[in-house]
Image (cartoon, coloured by chain):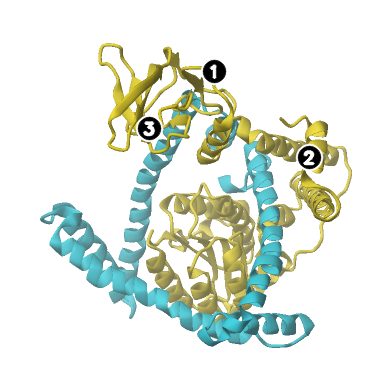
């Protein structure tokens, strides 16, 4: 984002500067950048400029940067070697230099300027409004459902099959393997996976079957062990909970895969659930599970791994279905309301995409781009 | 109940809200808050690693005690963990020392490479399963896959144009559709957690 803003500021460099050296605050930042402008030199021997900065009048100026073009009239001071911070008083001096890097003339010195930190990042305004709309719709539907209105949720085959999958494991006397993937607790996909683990572990406990949860991350391990323990407690079978069922393996990707594949080949789980964040190991896990003949349900938001799961698993939760799973399984009306809100948001996005695409096509075939841009600018008051 | 349910929900609500607000504020106070939160995550991760390692030792020592045919591997796992940690901590040069580096380069790296190499065989077997023309859609997938695969080998350069078109238009469109859904799902899940509507991650029900 900073690079984009710097590029934008560089574009502004074509605008005129009224005499000497001027300093402006860099917008939307933490006070670590300043914009320095000057009038270009008339000296024909000039090959560029030296930009000097003075942080402390006692220490004098030091060379901050060398500008290689005499046509350049703007410099963005953002250099981690010479950091700026909000409230720091600095002044700049611009000196024209020759090809031999001899100082030709001093173009001017700026007055003392102090950078300031912004309280709102204007470049994130669109994100802010999108978030407000998304949150608003979710809260609206939660409120609606609390008033007693019922909502329809389409069937998700992969989640409907969960009961059957756990039942199959019970009948065969084999465990259910639950893999949360390589995600960390800060990944939403892992949180969604942990949310599904609770109902699955409860079902396993009710069916008096066994669940195995190998973990990649120690924090995820502590959470999953607690979730499984609580699920057994909730199912009224705390005595059946075995701490061996939930365990930490390794934080090393392929060591983890080797261990999980080993479990699949030795323990022969009847059901494999791969729900969470997956990378290159997705196919290694799913194909090994496929070879053991287990019923497999996968779900991930890693778009690149979805084809592997679709190929090797019986059911796949694609992207958002993973997030909808806990609401779908619990049938909690408030949780279901959030799914409805997501559908409305998707509808809005579709309308926006289609209408903008049509506008774009019209722009190409019928209008000159500057006319359309002026209309949009006038309507939305874009500067 | 307060310590196990109400307090965690309160912490999640306050910090969740704070992190959303922090995202829009570039002020150093906000940035320092973000940095300190990231540090706390790392610190709690270090403590969780102790729990993770205790789980590792618990599971494998129990397997060793059972003395079945696979117990040997649990012994190897424990020995490797203690050995590598011991060499890394007490060995000459630590983790940059000759012994640790060589053990890493000569054992762990080839093992990793072996596991990763298996992927090519699994991709072949998965492709064999996927590309069966069972119905019209599967046939379309098969034809598309053949075009893309041929276009990616040396003698298939004449297909470059169509391969590029498939990857840039239909493929990107489908991926973006999924990504948009994922984005909305993430927002909804985050809000559910922040507001305390979704509590499954705390374990148990209400």
For marks 1 and 3, the one nearer the N-term is: 1
Q: Residue at x 81, y 42 (%)?
A: A372
Measured as percent of width and height from the top left, residue A298 is found at: 61, 67
Q: Residue at x 40, y 18 (%)?
A: A108
Tags 3 and 2 on a common chain: yes
What is the spatial separation of the Cα atoms under label 3 and label 2, in whole angstroms?
60 Å
Q: Which chain is yellow?
A: A
Q: Left or right: A167 with respect to B35?
A: right
SS assignment at label 1: loop
Which residue carries the number 3 mark? A46
Image quadrant containing the C terminus of chain B: top right
Tags 2 and 1 on a common chain: yes
What is the spatial separation of the Cα atoms under label 2 and label 1, in whole angstroms?
49 Å
Measured as percent of width and height from the top left, residue A61 is found at: 30, 20
Q: Left or right: A381 with respect to A246?
A: right
Which residue carries the number 1 mark? A18
Q: Which chain is cyan?
A: B
Which residue carries the number 2 mark? A137
Q: Chain of mark 2?
A: A
Q: Chain of mark 1?
A: A
């Amino acid at each position: 984002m900073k690079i984009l803003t710097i590029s934008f500021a560089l574009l502004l460099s074509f605008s005129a500067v009224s005499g000497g050296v001027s300093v402006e605050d860099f917008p939307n930042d933490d006070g670590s950048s300043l914009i320095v402008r000057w009038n270009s030199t008339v000296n024909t021997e000039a090959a560029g400029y030296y930009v000097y900065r003075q942080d402390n009048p006692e220490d004098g100026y030091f060379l901050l940067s060398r500008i290689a073009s005499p046509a350049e009239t703007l410099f963005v001071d953002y250099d981690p070697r010479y950091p700026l911070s909000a409230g720091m008083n600095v002044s700049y001096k611009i000196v024209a230099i020759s090809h031999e890097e001899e100082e030709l003339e001093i173009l001017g010195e700026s007055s003392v300027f102090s950078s300031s930190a912004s309280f709102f990042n204007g470049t994130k305004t669109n994100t802010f409004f999108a978030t407000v709309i998304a949150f608003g719709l979710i809260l609206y539907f939660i409120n609606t459902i609390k008033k007693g209105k019922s909502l329809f949720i389409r069937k998700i085959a992969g989640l409907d099959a969960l009961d059957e999958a756990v039942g199959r494991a019970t009948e065969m006397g084999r465990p259910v393997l639950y893999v949360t993937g390589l995600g960390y607790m800060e990944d939403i996909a892992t949180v969604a996976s942990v949310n599904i683990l609770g109902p699955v572990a409860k079902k396993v406990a009710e069916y008096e079957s066994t669940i195995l949860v190998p973990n990649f991350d120690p924090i995820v391990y502590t959470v999953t062990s607690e979730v499984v323990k609580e699920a057994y407690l909730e199912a009224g079978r705390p005595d059946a909970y075995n701490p061996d069922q939930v365990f930490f393996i390794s934080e090393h990707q392929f060591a983890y895969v080797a261990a999980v594949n080993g479990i699949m080949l030795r323990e022969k789980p009847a059901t494999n659930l791969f729900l969470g964040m997956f990378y290159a190991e997705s196919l290694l896990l799913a194909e090994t599970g496929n070879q053991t003949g287990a019923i497999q349900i996968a779900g991930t938001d890693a778009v690149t791994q979805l084809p592997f799961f679709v190929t090797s698993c019986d059911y796949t939760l694609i992207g958002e279905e993973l997030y909808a799973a806990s609401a779908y399984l619990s049938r909690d009306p408030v949780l279901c309301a959030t799914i409805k809100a997501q559908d409305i948001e998707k509808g809005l996005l579709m309308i926006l995409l289609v209408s903008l695409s049509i506008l774009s096509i019209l722009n190409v075939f019928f209008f000159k781009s500057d006319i359309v841009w002026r209309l949009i600018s006038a309507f939305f008051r874009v500067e | 109940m307060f310590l196990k349910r109400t307090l965690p929900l309160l912490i999640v609500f306050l910090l969740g809200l704070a992190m959303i607000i922090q995202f829009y504020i570039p002020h150093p106070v906000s940035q320092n808050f973000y940095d300190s939160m990231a540090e706390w995550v790392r610190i709690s991760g270090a403590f969780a690693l102790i729990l993770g390692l205790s789980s590792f030792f618990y599971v494998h020592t129990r397997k060793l005690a059972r003395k079945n045919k696979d117990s040997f591997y649990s012994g190897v796992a424990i020995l490797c963990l203690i050995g590598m940690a011991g060499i890394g901590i007490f060995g000459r040069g630590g983790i940059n020392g000759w012994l640790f580096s060589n053990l890493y380069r000569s054992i762990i790296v080839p093992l990793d490479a072996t596991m990763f190499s298996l992927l090519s065989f699994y991709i072949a077997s998965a492709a064999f399963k996927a590309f069966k023309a069972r119905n019209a859609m599967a046939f379309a997938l098969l034809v598309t896959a053949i075009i893309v695969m041929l276009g990616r080998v040396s003698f298939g350069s004449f297909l470059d144009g169509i391969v590029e078109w498939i990857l840039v238009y239909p493929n990107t469109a489908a991926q973006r559709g999924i990504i948009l859904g994922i984005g909305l799902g993430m927002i909804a899940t985050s809000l559910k957690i922040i507001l305390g509507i979704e509590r499954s991650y705390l374990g148990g029900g209400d």
